[in-house]
Image (tube, coloured by chain):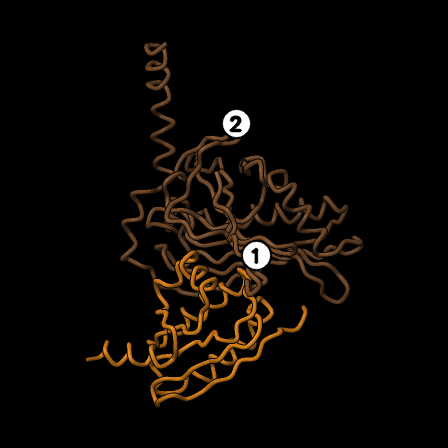
Chain colours: A brown, B orange
Amino acid sequence: MSVQPEQTTDTPSAPRDAAFWAQSVEKLSVTDAPAGATNLNVDGRQTVGPLQGFGQLWQKTYRIRLEGASVTPVEVVKAWKEHFPEFQPPSNRFYPSVAGVQPGEVVLINAMTPGGPVSTGVMVLYSDDETFTLMTPEGHPESGWVTFSAFEEDGITIAQVQSLSRANDPMYEAAFRVIGSNLQEKIWKHVLTSLAAHFNVEQPVVFNKTCVDPKLQWSQMGNIRYNAQIRTLFYTLAAPLRWIRGIFRS
Amino acid sequence: MPQADVKMTVHSIRPDIRSIAVDGEITAFAEEALMNAYQEASGEGVKTIILNFDGLKYMNSSGIGLLVTMLIRAQRQNQSLAAVGLNEHYRRIFELTRLNEAISIHPTEEDAIAALKSSVK
């Protein structure tokens, strides 16, 4: 379930960042889903960035100061990658591949929202020692990416989550405006608080958001055909049928 | 935050075209330098800004995010962005992040200007 990082490190002139980026792929491929994960709405989907979605484009930045913890940014990001699913709230299950948070790997997501369950995923777009970025596929609630990083400021290590994304289709945009945006902000605050707790730090999360582009991209309204929430709902409703079909097959 | 290891130089090519030459690294720390360069390049009557990446030495995902922000700012001013001097690796990153769908890519500044001329015919 991966896309290999660029194999250019054997070239003397390869840029330093070459090994940190996923390779370009036309469509994502998920062949071996981790145990317990529902593999829906990712395989065969294209990745989408902040330019492809429907809704307003927002940049949201969440920061926590790891005061009192003697950890470097590299150590923070290492722990973040290793324990990524554990830092999520219980309603948000992340299933990284065996390879973990590596460029090109797919992380499946099974989440429970007020609108019902959503099965989706993300691709690791970029990963180095102090940063990693996840990019969404078609049908995901958001179109864009979210970057997890750590850096030092005045001798204190700061952990940061920064998203640059817009709702993928009109239905998601409406949901984000009503409740989804607040829920999403709670998720990333929870993740940062859990990360800090891992280093025995208790600090508030500082949050700010900027509307980078207030326009709706009506040309993208057809994205709704891939809506993972709708498709997961139909998949869930069809579970008894799949069960009956299984009986007749066996 | 550490200082940005990048230098941006703005050139006027024509009254309606300016270029920003990037020399160094585009990471989150380059935000101020990049946005200042955009501000300088984005004078009255400027319709196109060419980003010259001949001197690009390193770019991470935060750096790509800065380019998206800059692109949106340019679009709101009815300006277009073009990229030149991208090597094969960075051209692939533009494809991977789908920035190539909104920023036209050309080998050189001359090619970008020629493409602009043919598109307005």
Q: Are marks 1 and 2 in contact (CB under 8 Å)?
A: no
Dividing the picture into quadrants, the one containing residue B6 is bottom right
Q: Is residue A45 above or below residue A148?
A: above
Closest to the observer, B21 or A73: B21
First of labels 1, 2 by sequence position = 1
**Which image quadrant is residue A215 in?**
bottom left
The quarter of the image holding the C terminus of chain A is: top left
At x 56% / y 55%, what residue is drawn?
A20
Instruction: Tell me which residue sits at (51%, 77%) in the image.
Output: B22
Q: What chain does mark 2 sit on?
A: A
Disc 1 crowd rating (10 Å Cα; few below 14, some 14-19, many 20+) is few
Task: Give the percent coordinates (x, y) of residue A230.
Answer: 34, 37
Is residue B8 shown left or right of residue A159?
A: left
Q: Is residue B52 above or below residue A56?
A: below
Which residue sits at x=50%, y=61%? Answer: A59
Residue type highlighted by circle 1:
Thr
In the orientation shown, which residue stands out farthest toward the left?
B121
Q: Is residue B111 above or below residue A124?
A: below
Q: Which residue bears the numbered disc 1?
A: A9
Judged left or right of residue A162, residue B12 is: left
Q: Foreground: B2 or B119?
A: B119
How far from the left and from the top, in percent, is residue A231?
35, 35
Please tell me which residue lies in front, A248 or A190.
A248
Q: Position of residue B82 (x, y in %)?
A: 37, 73
Q: Residues within 10 Å of mark 2 (few under 14, many from 20)?
A: few
The picture places residue B16, in percent across and down from the top left corner, at 34, 86
State how far apart marks 1 and 2 are (Cα).
Answer: 35 Å
Looking at numbered disc 2 in the image, what kind of residue is underneath it?
Gly
Q: Which mark is residue A36?
A: 2
Chain letter for mark 1, please: A
**Secondary structure beneath label 2:** loop
* Residue displayed at 68% across by 54% down: A204
